[in-house]
Image: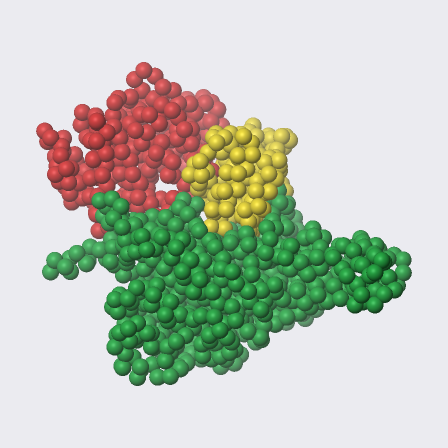
């Protein structure tokens, strides 16, 4: 079946089966910034924004996104780039597999709560696992990145 | 120093943040066949028949491979020095399956969906065999896990498959039995560690294609590309020259990708079909069918004098390698060789034990590589001993631990499955680490504990640790630096960036030596056709071993540049001063840009390429002291981790921020192993904790604060004074936390992980015992 | 999970007819837990177009549309202030944001999941469910019906009252399922529910009866209540904890919960 969605402000038609998950659809269509980590909504690396809200694309049926706006990291490149600069400063980059999902979740946090405390950042991003860094440098980077917007 | 030991962002951070295709699966051919494995539902069985006729009938199924399709040739999947100290006990496919998740047969189809459907259509008849699921009952069991012919050891490692022993070892300095008998105070206990999972976020992934020169090209998420190429060549009888292995960006390894995973299957499928193929492990497969940390039982005996001199250490280990023996001997030996020298003043020390086969998921390499297991046991036991002695644990360690310019006989005795290499600690700031950590955690205010509310106690605990910097005389790294027109460079390294940032720190070393900007040092790593030899990212070898190789190559390039500048300026090389931009001799100058353009376009044309290679003649250990502050709920046993202080001596930090990242990431994984990462099996031997809903790694909310500092230290033999730092962070948390829990509530846990339930039950039992 | 057909409609009656049409037809909520089942679904019926994703506060109640996402609830002001915000608090500990934006209250209620962190707080509030065919039923009654006829949940209604609340989830890491969870509320009477025992949330009836019959609730009464609860409740063992440990947690956290709702009064 065919559905219409908007990905990063461009309209797309996806030909899908009803039990297909968004992660598979997106990767199949070349959106390779969306990563497959745990495949059961526990690690966060497959995060995309659905109408500006972060969702685990491994767990969302593609058909449910009909008529919606999907954003991958390419769609928020300015914010991602800024976060990347802070992560570079804080030494928060390691394997990079979770980086796009961090930027996307941070972007959504900013819409909901532009001035979060460190604790609020941690709680909002709790579903974004990282096995490399110990997290602290990421949280500092995100806080500094959001402070830039003030 | 301008570049080294300075804040330099990762060279790849931005590109990865922007989501540019970089990882193995991003680089698969779009029309790759999907390769999947039918896996054993039984922990131990003989395959009697595989009927895949229905699967083959399914449109889109390309082929099915069983053990009959492979030449029977044993190998080890461990990516380590060759010849390997691991037994050759694995066949690509075998008629036996030895754990739940073991490979039965392989299917290739045009889509993921069809491939899954095909797996369901395959009927397998098994003769079910008795499994061994308790590693303490493996030796001389009636069940033999590897009864087959054609398996062997490359050199003596104590391999006795008929007794279910994959490897064994024994060494003794002095007489432990005699000294323990004579010691005024002794301690004896056993400790258990679990089969921790690596949980790198990128699953094991590989793809294959045949290029236009008819050569096999593999992209694989690996820590050891050259070992992968060699093992494939050996096991599948393909000339090494026909294989190209490319390691793209890797999404974390931690030792888990220091083994062959799907490479044999995609290789075979692509060679048989001529079509590109790919394999991405499901998370369940990563848990059940890749590798874990070796679970161990560690029996420790200590002897000391009343005034607090540690006299003797006896350490026996039983290690569980699961169904296959990857890294069996070496992980087990590191539990001694990178732990016991911490207390180098003992009169006698013994280390011995066995590594046994069981019908569990195979164990393999994992950051810490035995040291974390040994450290948990020894550093717990030390705290138990000091309590008996009535001596302060920090004072005891200060008195008995290894210090600068000292040595331990163990270095010479124990190596990588063979003899070791004698060395003296030219750089060892462990004393500083111990004292600085004490200040940072506020030890003297809290130790042993403070009552903070009616139901909460705050306490501290600590442990010291050491690791290594590569494997002397075995690990080899090399680097090639190419000068380009306009005066920038390519740095080509075999060293394997798996997310730890080695591309960045190696570029820093080269840029420092050539006095150029980091942007002018373009790194390309780990492509067997294009980059020089390097054994790979393991054993904390990259900074020290590969870093030294880069340093040598850069030095050589610098000499070549000066030589060429002297020709251009018509002066003697020794008259030239070079600041990284301009060559000056008297009043004559030429810039690096002009010199390189001259070399490539105008006069005396030639390509400048410099290669350096390095192997260690010793393995200078990084050291650290780890201190933790916790709060324990005395009614429930729940623990909050308030602060983890790490003070690390890794020599010069080439990149202080990335070094900090290595330490903190290691600490968090160590905390995971210590507190949360429970490994549970059903009675049948099926892993229960086989996904991220059930296997719990720390999230960003578990640890309130990490405090990380580096000691001022300089290792003469390292590049710019550096030692390695990849593993040292992981070692201290289990013992530090067990010690902190003891300091808080007086119960000693000896089995990891240290869950609230175990703490609570131990408190309850103590209460009941006291009431009796 | 296999889904053969997908039917989207804004008409609940059409959806209801379709639901009854085939045994293997289901109403799909957020679909967050689909991946964990091995079901074969003939037709998945999606009522997203019916716009049941709003939270409406009236004079007496808060009405949550069945398709409202967990995160919408988590940040809803009315629910944050009702009963000390225990529903929002409970949701804030459920997995990550990526799931809380997918999972719906309808799916969470209809699944009757034993590990649910949502049913436990809902049960200590005055909660009822409105079904397309059946009409309104109290959540407690719904929980007690083993085989509720196939129906479509339309909204969840929480009656507003000046109830004090307490919720606590014991979990091993912040992303984990509950080892056990607790909700306590106090209006005229005290209610206590314990979920993820590891089976589904229930009330320790004897303990609740005991405490509600006391004229004065002091520390001793609270301790006795907690102890009665720990002894009467059926608790099991699973991969997250053994029954003995759960029993101790029941005693500790019911005590803490009762103290909190009692002290809130001042």
Q: Nearer the viewer, residue B730 or B307?
A: B307
Q: Quadrant of residue A29?
A: top right
Q: Quadrant of the N terminus of chain B?
A: bottom right
Q: Which chain, by letter, is yellow?
A: A
In the image, taking residue B389 as reference, residue B468 lies left or right, namely right
Q: Quadrant of the C terminus of chain B?
A: bottom left
User: Picture coordinates of residue C95 (x, y %)?
Assistant: 41, 41
In the image, taking residue C80 as reference, residue B9 lies left or right, namely right
In the image, taking residue B760 as reference, residue A148 lies left or right, namely right
User: Picture coordinates of residue B106 (x, y %)?
Assistant: 54, 60
User: Picture coordinates of residue B516 (x, y %)?
Assistant: 71, 55
Say whether residue B608 is visible. Answer: no
User: Residue drawn 89% across and 58% down?
Assistant: B602
Say whether residue B709 is visible. Answer: yes
User: Residue drawn 70% across and 63% down?
Assistant: B554
User: Residue drawn 41% across and 28% down?
Assistant: C75
User: Quick check: B673 above or below C263?
Assistant: below
Residue at the farthest right position: B603
Q: Nearer the viewer, residue B544 or A113?
A: B544
User: Quick check: B570 above or below B312?
Assistant: above
Q: Which chain, by letter, is green?
A: B
The colour style of the image is by chain
User: Picture coordinates of residue C116 (x, y %)?
Assistant: 33, 38
In the image, taking residue B405 as reference, residue B575 lies left or right, namely right
Count numbered badges in the picture.
0
Q: Nearer the viewer, residue B399 or C224?
A: B399
Residue at the farthest front position: B586
**Chain C appears what colour?**
red
Residue at the farthest top position: C59
User: Residue drawn 56% across and 28% down?
Assistant: A67
């Amino acid at each position: 079946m065919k559905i219409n969605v908007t990905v990063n402000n461009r309209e797309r038609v996806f030909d899908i089966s009803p039990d297909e998950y968004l992660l598979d659809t997106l990767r199949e269509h070349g959106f390779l910034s969306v990563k497959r980590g745990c495949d059961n909504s526990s690690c966060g690396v497959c995060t995309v924004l659905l109408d500006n809200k972060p969702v685990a694309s491994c767990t969302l049926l593609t058909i449910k996104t009909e008529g919606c706006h999907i954003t991958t990291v390419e769609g928020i490149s300015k914010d991602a780039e800024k976060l990347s600069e802070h992560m570079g400063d804080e030494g928060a980059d390691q394997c990079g597999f979770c980086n796009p999902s961090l930027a996307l979740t941070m972007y959504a946090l900013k819409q909901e709560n532009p001035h979060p405390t460190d604790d609020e950042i941690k709680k909002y991003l709790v579903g974004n696992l990282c096995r490399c860094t110990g997290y602290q440098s990421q949280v500092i980077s995100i806080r500094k990145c959001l402070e830039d917007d003030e | 120093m301008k570049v080294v030991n300075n804040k330099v962002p990762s060279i790849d951070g931005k590109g990865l943040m922007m989501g540019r295709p970089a990882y193995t699966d991003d680089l698969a051919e779009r029309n790759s066949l999907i390769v999947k494995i039918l896996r054993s539902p039984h922990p131990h069985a003989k395959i009697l028949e595989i009927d895949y006729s229905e699967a083959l009938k399914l449109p889109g199924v390309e082929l099915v491979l069983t053990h009959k399709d492979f030449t029977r040739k044993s190998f080890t999947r461990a990516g380590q020095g060759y010849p390997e100290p691991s037994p050759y006990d694995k066949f690509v496919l075998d008629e036996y399956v030895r754990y739940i998740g073991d490979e039965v047969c392989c299917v290739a189809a045009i889509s993921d969906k069809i491939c899954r459907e095909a797996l369901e259509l395959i009927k397998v008849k098994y003769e079910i065999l008795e499994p061994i699921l308790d590693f303490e009952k493996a030796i001389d069991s009636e069940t033999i896990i590897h009864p087959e012919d054609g398996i062997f050891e490359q050199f003596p490692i104590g391999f006795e498959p008929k007794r279910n022993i994959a490897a064994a070892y024994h060494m003794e300095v002095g007489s432990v039995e005699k000294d323990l008998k004579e010691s005024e105070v002794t301690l004896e206990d056993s400790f258990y560690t679990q089969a921790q999972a690596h949980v790198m976020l990128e699953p094991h992934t590989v793809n294959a294609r045949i290029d236009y020169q008819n050569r096999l090209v593999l992209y694989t998420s690996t820590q050891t590309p050259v070992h992968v190429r060699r093992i494939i060549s050996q096991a599948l009888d393909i000339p090494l020259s026909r294989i190209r292995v490319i390691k793209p960006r890797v999404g974390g390894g931690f030792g888990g990708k220091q083994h062959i995973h799907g490479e044999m299957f995609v290789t075979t499928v692509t060679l048989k079909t001529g079509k590109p193929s790919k394999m991405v492990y499901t998370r369940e497969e990563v848990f059940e069918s890749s590798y874990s940390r070796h679970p161990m039982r560690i029996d420790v005996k200590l002897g000391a004098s009343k005034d607090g001199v540690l006299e003797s250490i006896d350490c026996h280990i039983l290690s569980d390698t699961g169904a296959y023996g990857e890294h069996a001997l070496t992980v087990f030996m590191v539990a001694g060789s990178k732990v016991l020298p911490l207390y180098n003043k003992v009169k006698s020390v013994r280390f011995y034990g066995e590594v046994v086969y069981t019908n569990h998921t195979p164990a393999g390499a994992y950051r810490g590589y035995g040291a974390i297991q040994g450290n948990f046991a020894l550093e717990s036991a030390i705290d138990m001993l000091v309590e008996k002695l009535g001596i302060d644990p920090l004072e005891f360690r200060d008195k008995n631990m290894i210090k600068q310019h000292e040595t331990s006989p163990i270095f010479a005795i124990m190596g990588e499955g063979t003899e070791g290499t004698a060395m003296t600690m030219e750089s060892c700031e462990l004393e500083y680490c111990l004292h600085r950590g004490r200040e940072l955690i506020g030890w003297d205010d809290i130790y042993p504990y403070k009552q903070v509310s009616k139901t909460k106690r705050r306490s501290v605990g600590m442990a010291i640790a050491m690791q290594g910097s590569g494997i002397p005389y075995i690990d080899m790294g090399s680097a090639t630096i190419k000068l380009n027109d306009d005066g920038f460079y390519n740095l080509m390294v075999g060293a394997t960036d798996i997310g730890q940032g080695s591309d960045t720190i190696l570029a820093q070393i080269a840029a420092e030596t050539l006095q150029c900007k980091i942007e002018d040092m373009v790194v390309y790593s780990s492509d067997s056709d294009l980059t020089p030899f390097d054994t790979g990212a393991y054993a904390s070898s990259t900074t020290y071993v590969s870093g030294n190789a880069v340093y040598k190559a850069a030095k050589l390039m610098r000499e070549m540049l000066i030589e060429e500048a002297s020709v251009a300026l018509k002066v003697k090389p020794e008259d030239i001063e070079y600041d990284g931009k301009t060559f000056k001799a008297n009043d004559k100058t030429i810039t690096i840009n002009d010199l390189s353009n001259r070399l490539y376009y105008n006069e005396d044309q030639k390509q400048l390429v410099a290669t350096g290679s390095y192997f260690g003649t010793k393995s200078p250990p990084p050291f650290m002291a780890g201190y933790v502050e916790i709060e324990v709920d005395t009614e429930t046993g729940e623990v909050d981790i308030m602060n983890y202080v790490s003070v690390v001596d890794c020599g010069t930090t080439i990149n202080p921020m990335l070094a900090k990242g290595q330490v903190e990431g290691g600490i968090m994984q160590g905390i995971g192993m210590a507190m949360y990462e429970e490994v549970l099996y059903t009675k049948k031997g099926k892993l229960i904790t086989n996904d991220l809903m059930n296997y719990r790694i720390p999230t960003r909310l578990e640890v309130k604060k990490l405090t990380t500092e580096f000691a001022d230290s300089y290792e003469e033999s390292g590049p710019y004074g550096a030692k390695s730092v990849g593993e040292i962070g992981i070692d201290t948390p289990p013992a530090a936390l067990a010690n902190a829990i003891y300091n808080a509530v007086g119960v000693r846990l000896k089995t990891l992980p240290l869950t609230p339930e175990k703490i609570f039950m131990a408190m309850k039992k103590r209460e009941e015992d006291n009431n009796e | 999970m296999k889904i053969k057909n997908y039917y989207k409609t804004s008409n609940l009656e059409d959806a209801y007819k379709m639901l009854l049409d085939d045994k293997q037809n289901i109403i799909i909520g957020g679909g967050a837990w689909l991946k964990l089942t091995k079901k074969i679904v003939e037709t998945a019926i999606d009522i997203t177009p019916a716009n049941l994703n709003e939270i409406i506060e009236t004079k007496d109640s808060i009405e949550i549309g069945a398709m409202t996402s967990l995160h919408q609830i988590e940040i809803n002001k009315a629910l944050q202030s009702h009963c000390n915000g225990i529903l929002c608090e409970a949701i804030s500990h459920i997995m990550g944001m990526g799931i809380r934006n997918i999972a719906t209250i309808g799916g969470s209620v209809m699944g009757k999941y034993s590990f649910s962190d949502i049913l436990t707080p809902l049960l200590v509030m005055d909660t009822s469910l409105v079904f397309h065919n059946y009409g309104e039923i109290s959540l407690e009654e719904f929980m007690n019906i083993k085989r509720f006829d196939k129906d479509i949940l339309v909204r969840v209604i929480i009656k507003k009252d000046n109830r004090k609340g307490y919720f606590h989830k014991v979990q091993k890491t912040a992303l984990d399922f509950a080892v056990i969870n607790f909700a306590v509320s106090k209006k005229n009477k005290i209610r206590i529910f314990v979920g993820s025992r590891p089976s589904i949330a229930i009330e320790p009836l004897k303990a609740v009866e005991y405490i509600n019959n006391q004229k004065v609730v002091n520390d001793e009464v609270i301790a006795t209540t907690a102890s009665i609860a720990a002894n009467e409740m059926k608790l099991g063992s699973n991969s997250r904890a053994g029954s003995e440990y759960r029993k101790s947690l029941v005693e500790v956290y019911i005590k803490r919960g009762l103290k909190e709702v009692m002290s809130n009064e001042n």
